[in-house]
Amino acid sequence: MKRLEDKIAIITGSGAGIGKQIARTYAQEGAKVVIADFDEKALQTTVNALQEQGYDALGVKVNVAEASEVQAMIDDTVEAFGRIDILVNNAGVGDNMQAAAHVEDATWERVMNVNVNGVMHTLRAIIPIFIKNGGGTIVNMASITGLTGGRGGLAYTASKHAVVGMTKNVASQYGPEHIRCNAIAPAQVETEFSARMTNVDPFGLEIATRGVNLMPKAGQVQDIANIALFLASEESAYINGVALAADAGWSAY
Ligand SMILES: NC(=O)c1ccc[n+]([C@@H]2O[C@H](COP(=O)([O-])OP(=O)(O)OC[C@H]3O[C@@H](n4cnc5c(N)ncnc54)[C@H](O)[C@@H]3O)[C@@H](O)[C@H]2O)c1
């Protein structure tokens, strides 16, 4: 028996990077996966690759910052598969490492709209479905910046602290409904995430990365997908409301 046999899983931001690897790992473990991303080309490439390997994958174009699009994603999934068991809130964007004195309004709004409002939108839409189904599992992608203070810009750090807060709030309030909500807090993972940042704040970058040489190593997408698999599976049934640092011990110092 595979670890996610016949489970239905939505993974946001799964057209690329960490989310894409989580989707592949879930599919390998028997889940039917929904590749939800606002990059249509990336999501279609991912869906095609999974289907060619014989996995059940549905592509849904969604901007998680838009509540109506999130609702449509949930409705499309229920229509296609009849049920939802697992939600991975992985879509997220960076803040160009802007320190507090240099935060641009547009950066603040974009980061909050995607990283915070996006997670709220999916939680609000999925929880009633999970309650009706008798339970469900949520995995939120936070960041080590959600557990520490100085390793990112102001907006990104605030947004990932909010993700950790939402994780604990949902676990605490809906645990009795058999809903589990946990977060992963990765350090640096090798994806296109940093390359997507433009016009980086030199001051913010310098102070946020001054401890990077103490990080034993960067993570690979499979390292994070393995944790997301554990948190989605029954093996973590007794874990609820935690934010697991995935940083090779970097923040333990
Ligand atoms: N890479 C890292 O070092 C790192 C470290 C800690 C946490 N994280 C977090 O992990 C998550 C995934 O990061 P990644 O490194 O794979 O990034 P990535 O940029 O490689 O991939 C992110 C994916 O999310 C999609 N996306 C972005 N905004 C979206 C939106 N509004 N709606 C739907 N889809 C959207 C993108 O199109 C892309 O396919 C993010 O939440 C990020 O904050 C990344």
Image: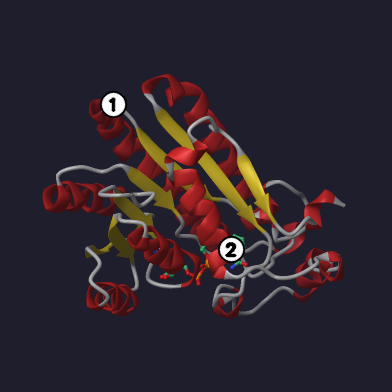
How far across and how far down the image is residue 3, in percent?
39, 49
Q: Give the residue displayed 69% in from the left and 67% down from the top.
A: 97
Residue lying at the far front in this picture: please name it: 1
Q: Residue at x 35, y 52 (%)?
A: 2
Secondary structure of residue under mark 2: helix
Is 223 situated above or below 133?
below
Q: Earlier in the sequence, mark 2 or mark 1?
A: 1
The numbered dot on residue 134 is 1
User: Which label is found at residue 223?
Assistant: 2
Q: SS class of the residue under badge 1? A: loop
Describe residue 28's horizontal placement relative to residue 17 as left or right.
Answer: left
Q: Report which quarter residue 223 is drawn in.
A: bottom right
Which x, y percent locates residue 186?
Answer: 64, 58
| Residue 81 position in % (x across, y down) | 16, 50
**Residue 227 or residue 148, whichever sits in front:** 227
Q: Residues within 10 Å of mark 1 (few under 14, many from 20)?
A: few
Q: Residue at x 24, y 53 (%)?
A: 73
Instruction: Say whether residue 188 is left or right of residue 183.
Output: right
**Does mark 2's beta carbon lie closer than 8 Å to ligand 1?**
no
Q: CA distance from mark 2 to mark 1?
A: 30 Å
